[in-house]
């Protein structure tokens, strides 16, 4: 493997760097976007249990309980925000406004680093093309080529290897990165739809006569 890297020349190092970065992002996002991480077992049960207590004749719920709910998972701040507004006696319009602000923060957490992964899928082939150009320059810029002679076979072989290896590595990085981005993008969208649905159900439970739309 090391001999291949040497044959590919210095343009291969930027490709290796972005490949490691892309792999790290893909692993982190796949772990973060797991359903069990966004919606732990006790998250929804706790949220709706607190909602029932708020709607009860004698509410014993405290702000500390809501704060603890907000720290359970990435989605729980949405539930905590809805409960907090109801506990404070806010109207449905005021609660919805706060909920939408909290939702924007949640969506940013779900989409985090996906833009960087998309960028990697774009620049990897370009870096591979750059390495190809460098290899061609080494071929035609050799001393033998300048003087009109045949040139060194070793120089020719090295230039060809730089060109081909970088092209191959650029595609080898871009194709899996694109597949990972599309898969993770779909996971993030699915988690977002689930957040919206569960929050809508909780909101309707607390404000039964008002519609809710948090995706704005």
Image: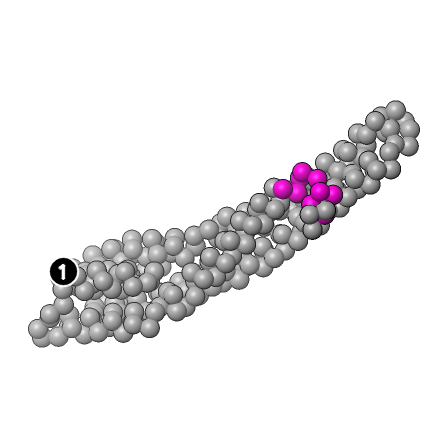
Of 1 and 149, which appears nearest the observer? Answer: 1
Question: Residue at the location (27% across, 74% down)?
Answer: 45
Expressed as whole percent of the image width and height from the top left, the position of residue 178 reads: 58, 55
Question: Residue at the location (25% across, 55% down)?
Answer: 97
When asked about the image quadrant of residue 63, the answer is bottom left
- Label 1 environment density (alpha carbons within 10 Å; few <14, some 14–19, many ≥20): few
Answer yes or no: is residue 45 visible.
yes
155 left or right of 125 in image: right
Q: Farthest residue in the right direction?
A: 149
Q: Which residues are magenta?
A: 4-13
Q: Farthest residue in the left direction?
A: 58
Q: Is residue 6 magenta?
A: yes
172 left or right of 108 in image: right
Mark 1 lies on residue: 88
161 w.r.t. 179: above or below: above
Question: Residue at the location (15% across, 70% down)?
Answer: 54
192 left or right of 71 in image: right
Q: Is residue 157 magenta?
A: no
17 w.r.t. 97: above or below: above
């Amino acid at each position: 493997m090391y001999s291949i890297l040497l044959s590919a020349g210095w343009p291969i190092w930027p490709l290796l760097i972005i490949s490691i970065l892309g792999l790290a992002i893909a692993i982190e996002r796949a772990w973060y976007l797991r359903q069990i991480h966004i919606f732990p077992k006790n998250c929804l049960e706790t949220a709706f249990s607190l909602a029932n207590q708020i709607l009860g004749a004698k509410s014993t719920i405290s702000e500390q309980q809501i704060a603890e709910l907000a720290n359970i998972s990435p989605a729980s701040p949405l539930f905590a925000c809805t409960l907090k507004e109801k506990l404070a006696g806010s109207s449905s319009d005021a609660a919805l406004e706060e909920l939408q602000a909290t939702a924007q923060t949640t969506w940013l957490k779900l989409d985090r680093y996906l833009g960087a992964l998309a960028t990697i899928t774009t620049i990897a082939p370009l870096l591979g093309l750059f390495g190809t150009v460098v290899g061609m320059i080494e071929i035609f810029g050799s001393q033998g080529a300048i003087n009109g002679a045949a040139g060194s076979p070793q120089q020719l072989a090295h230039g060809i290897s730089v060109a081909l290896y970088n092209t191959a590595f650029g595609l080898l990085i871009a194709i899996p990165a694109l597949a990972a981005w599309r898969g993770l993008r779909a996971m993030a969208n699915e988690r977002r739809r689930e957040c919206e649905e569960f929050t809508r159900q909780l909101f309707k439970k607390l404000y039964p006569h008002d519609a809710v739309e948090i995706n704005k």
